Amino acid sequence: MMGWSTFGNVKLMDDGPFERNPHYVRLSDSGHKEKHTGIENEGFFGIGVKEGAEYRFSVWARGENQKLRIELIKNNTMGEHQAFETKDLVVNSKDWKQYELILKSPVTEPKAHLRIFLEGKGTVDLEHVSLFPVDTWKGRKNGLRKDLVQALYDIKPGVFRFPGGCIVEGTDEATRYEWKNTVGAVENRPLNENRWHYTFKHRFFPDYFQTYGLGFFEYFQLSEDIGAEPLPILNCGLICQFQNDSEHQISLSKLDTYIQDAFDLIEFANGDATTKWGKVRADMGHPESFNLKFLGIGNEQWGPEYPERLKKFVEVLRKAHPEIKIVGSSGPNSEGKDFDYLWPEMKNLKVDLVDEHFYRPESWFLAQGNRYDNYDRKGPKVFAGEYACHGKGKKWNHFNAALMEVAFMTGMERNADVVHMATYAPLFAHVEGWQWRPDMIWFDNLNSVRTCSYYVQQLYGHNKGTNVLPLTMDKKPVSGQEGQDGLFASAVWDKDEKAYIVKIANTSDVAQPVSLTFAGLKKNDKLVEGKCITFQSADLDKDNTLENPNAITPKESAVTVDGSLLNVEVAPKTFVLYKFIKTSNK
C-alpha cells in the first residue's frame, strides 16, 4: 500500500491478471449510505499538476456497470471542495480491461493527490492505477518528464550510464537489480526494494521502492533520444560489499545465470526481432537495434572476488561478442590499496575500459591535474564513471566545487587518448527526497534547476572538438603545477567546424595575465568569429536554485585575435572558454 490510503470497504487481493504483479484492490459497498469506499494516492511528495495541462488516467479494472469518480484533489485547501478536477468512469466488463480518461487541471498545484470513489453499491476491482502528463518528452504515452530530459539533451552527452552504480548490486541477492524484470509490459514488472531505502538513518526513506516503470527499454530509448551511447551496468555476481562480508556473498556456482543475463541483454539491445530477447524489444515498439557497444560488469567491487568473477564474463563474452567493449572497475576509491590491486588485474583481464570513481574535496581535484599524463597508453582506457567535487565542510552544490571540476576535466581532455569517457554523478535529485549531494540537476514536482556543475558539463559537451592540441606553459602542461599560479588549461581542434577551442580555469584568488599563442598558423590563416564564454560567481559558496535558476550562468562575448596572439586577463576563480574559426585566404 505504499503511497496509498484507503477508506470504506477495500480489500487487497492477490490473484490479479499480471503474474509478476498479482496484487489489486477490491472496492465494495461500505454498508452505510454515509460511508464512502475508495482509495487515494499521495504521489511522490505530492503530484505536481499545471494549469491547463492534461493528465492521462488509466486503470485495469473489472466490474459490471460500476461507476467510479476520479478526482484530482488538494487536501489542505480552504476552498469549499477538495477536488478541482473530476471525471466519471464506468467499468462495464466482468473481465479485466484497461480504461483511460483525460483529466485537465484548472489550477497549478504541486501537492495534489489522486482520489478514486466507488459510486454505487456494487463491487469493482482495480489494478495498475496510473496518472501521467499527456505532454511528455517526445509525446510518448506515459513517457518521461519533459524538462528533465531536455536538460540532459541540452548537454549533448556522449555516453549515458544506467541504471546507476550501487543500485545494481542490491543489499542482498533477492533485491539486486535484474534488468529482465524491467522490460515487457509495464503492468507486469515486479516491485523491487531499493538498495538505499533502509541504509541511512540520517536520511531515511523506508518506502523508497522501485516499480521498474522506468526500465532498461526506457533507458536505451532515452540514450537514443539524447544522442548518447548507452552504457548499461550489470551485476557481476556480487552483492554490495559495503553491506555484506565475503561469507555472505553469492556463490560462484550461480555465476552462469549472471553471465547469461549479459548475453541476453546484448540480444535484447542488438538482436533482430527473430531472437527471443530481440522480439521483446521489437514488441515494445523498437524493432531496430539499439546499437549497444559498451557493457559494464560490476560497479564498485574490490578484492580478489571481483576479478575472479569478471574473468569468467570476459572469457565467454570475448568469444561470442568481440564487438562489445567491456568496462571493468578500479573499485570505490581513486587511489589506495584496492585501486592499486585492481588496475593490474583489469590489465591482465584485458578489459577495454576501467571505471574510476572520484568523490573528493577541492584539494584532491587541484592536485590531480597530471593524473593521466603517465597512464599506460597500451593498456585499458579510462572511464571516469562517477565524479563530483565534494566541498570540504560544505558538501552541497556551489560554484567553487564546479570550478574544481573544470580544472580536473582539463586533464581528462588533454589525455583523451586514455580517458575515453566521463560521467558526472549523481545526475538527478528531488529536493525533498535525496540521499547524496551534490547532484547535477535538482527538481521538485513542477520545476527543475541546472546547477553550476551542469553548466560545466554542458560547456565541455558542446565544445569537445575532434582532436587534442598541445597546450603548454614554459613547455609544461597547464595543470596547476608549481609556478603556474593555479591555472589549468586544455585545447582542442574541431575539424568539422574548423575551430580552435581553449578552456582555462583560474583557480587562484587573483587575476592572471594569459597570452595565447597559436603557433601552428600559416601565413594566410586567420582566426575569426572569436567568442569568449565566461563562467564565474561573486559568491563561491552559492549555486542556482529552484527560486533563482539563472543566478549563475555562462556569459558570452566577442573577442578578436591580433594575428596569432591573444593577450587576456583571466579573473580570479573563473572558467573561460575561447573559440575561434580558422579561415585561409589563398
Image (tube, rainbow, N blue to C red):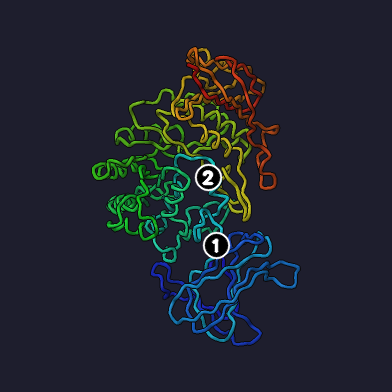
The answer to whether any part of residue 6 appears in the image is: no
Amino acid at pointer 2: Leu
Is the residue marked by circle 2 packed among few (<14), some (14-19), or many (20+) residues within 10 Å?
many
Q: Residue at x 53, y 45 (%)?
A: 152
Q: In the figure, is residue 94 to the left or right of 532?
A: left
Residue 36 x, y percent position in the rendering: 62, 81
Rendered position, 231 above or below 45: above
Asked whether 341 or 49 is in front, the reply is: 49
Residue holding disc 1:
132
Is the residue marked by circle 1 packed among few (<14), some (14-19), or many (20+) residues within 10 Å?
many
Q: Residue at x 59, y 22 (%)?
A: 486
Asked whether 234 or 345 is in front, the reply is: 234
The numbered dot on residue 339 is none
Q: Element under label 2?
A: helix
The answer to whether any part of residue 583 appears in the image is: yes
Amino acid at pointer 1: Phe
Residue holding disc 2:
152
Residue 146 x, y percent position in the rendering: 56, 52
Rendered position, 561 above or below 450: above
Rendered position, 111 above or below 449: below
Q: CA distance from mark 1 to mark 2?
A: 20 Å
Residue 347 x, y percent position in the rendering: 32, 32
Residue 489: which quarter of the image? top right
Q: Residue at x 54, y 59 (%)?
A: 206
Q: In the figure, is residue 269 to the left or right of 437?
A: left
The residue sitting at the left extreme is: 319
Q: How many marks?
A: 2
Q: Element under label 1?
A: strand
Residue 515 x, y percent position in the rendering: 59, 15
Q: Residue at x 34, y 53 (%)?
A: 268
